[in-house]
Amino acid sequence: MKPINLTDYEILARARLDPGVYGYVAGGAGDEVTLRENQAAFQRLRLLPRVLVDVSGVDRSTTVLGTRIALPVLLAPTAFQSLVHPEGELAVARASAAAGTVMVVSTMSGYRMEEIAAAATGPKWFQLYCYRDRAVTQAFVERAEVAGYSAVCLTVDLPRVGRRERDLRNEFNLPPTVMPRNFAGLIDLSGLTDGAAAAAFAEYIHKLVDPSLTWTAVDWLRSKTALPILLKGILTAADARLAVERGVNGLIVSNHGARQLDTVPATIDVLAEIVDVVAGRAEVLLDGGVRRGTDVIKALAHGARAVLIGRPYLYGLAVDGEAGVRRVLELLAEETDLALALLGCPGVRDVGREHVRR
Ligand SMILES: Cc1cc2nc3c(=O)[nH]c(=O)nc-3n(C[C@H](O)[C@H](O)[C@H](O)COP(=O)(O)O)c2cc1C
């Protein structure tokens, strides 16, 4: 089968991947209510096109935190990309640069952040967890700055790891070849791959990540870096307000791809109220369930600056390495172009709330 959309890539990746690895990527928390809802909520929205608009030159480019991107789609941080392809993050970095977008590199990458930065010259942001050991956290920020990352994205929805039952059933654990190499030399990694299964993996992450984190951590991070700061994992207007009061530069409306607390709402369903509270004081991005150009448009219509995708590019990577990730981004770009034209919007700024109906 020649994949012609993102779902095709998932079908092909599923056939190719070890079932445990596929479960780790595809799965969500608990009963996966939110996992289904992330996509279903996009599908429930209806688009309202305007006609007889000159769309001979559709422009899907935009900027995020001042960086120009060729399409309003970034690559969300996902851990251990070398699980699905040996070139892992290096291939993704090259594909991201070729597509002209931003790659957000996970702290839990299979390659070191410096190797990923060197793999391609495209713009990159560094995703950070706040560790119990603040010296390690600070060292990561400093390394990211030196390596040329242009923003820090602090993930705030993981005080503990969600209950991912596919991983429990599959007794999924990292193979010995896959490690969070950023930690090498800083933290003893031996507990990660010594045969214990998913519960132990969650326990291991629990040992690293600081569950006592509060809003003062944002001030602490601000005092340690001049890079723009985004908070990833905001789902309520109340938290969005606190975030902009702390002076963050961006928010990512995210439920961690439905991998943390099950039965939280779909991200697209809370986007508009968050955009309203933020009122232009920070850029608002969204991830979770974006699979079509029309999903991208629906997020923009609700006021997102851009969206991020997670699983779809991992499926592209699993199927065809760098070329697969490129193709996934190309397909989304083509679909976004077509949706803009058919909606009567020559550019991304022309998309507004009047173009969607609940
Ligand atoms: C396999 C996998 C690993 C992930 N690892 C991380 C991570 O290390 N840090 C993080 O902030 N988010 C992580 N996420 C969440 C993604 O950044 C993103 O929020 C989510 O994948 C978006 O939903 P989507 O997969 O439906 O596009 C991960 C998601 C997946 C699927």
Image (cartoon, grey):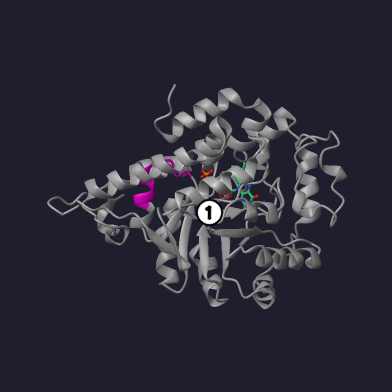
What residue type is disc 1 on?
Ser
Residue 282, x across and y down, in percent: 47, 70
Q: Does 134 appear above or below 266?
A: below
Residue 339, x across and y down, in percent: 29, 45
Q: What quarter of the picture does the N terminus occupy?
A: top left
Residue 38, x across and y down, in percent: 47, 44
On whether ligand 1 comes within 8 Å of the CB at mark 1, the answer is yes
Side of 171 where 258 appears, left or right: left
Which residue has dot 1 on it?
Answer: 254
Given residues 317 and 196, the one toward you in this image is: 317
Side of 180 where 195 appears, left or right: right
Residue 217 drawn in magenta: no
Q: Does 235 appear above or below 174?
A: below
* Magenta-highlighted residues: 289-298
Q: Does 261 appear above or below 193?
A: below
Query: Which residue sits at x=41%, y=59%?
Result: 304
Assign the magenta stretch its main secondary structure.
helix
Of all residues, the one furthest to the left in this rendering is 52
Residue 234, x across and y down, in percent: 54, 60
Side of 292 where 155 appears, left or right: right
The quarter holding residue 259 reads top right
- Looking at the image, can residue 33 be seen? no
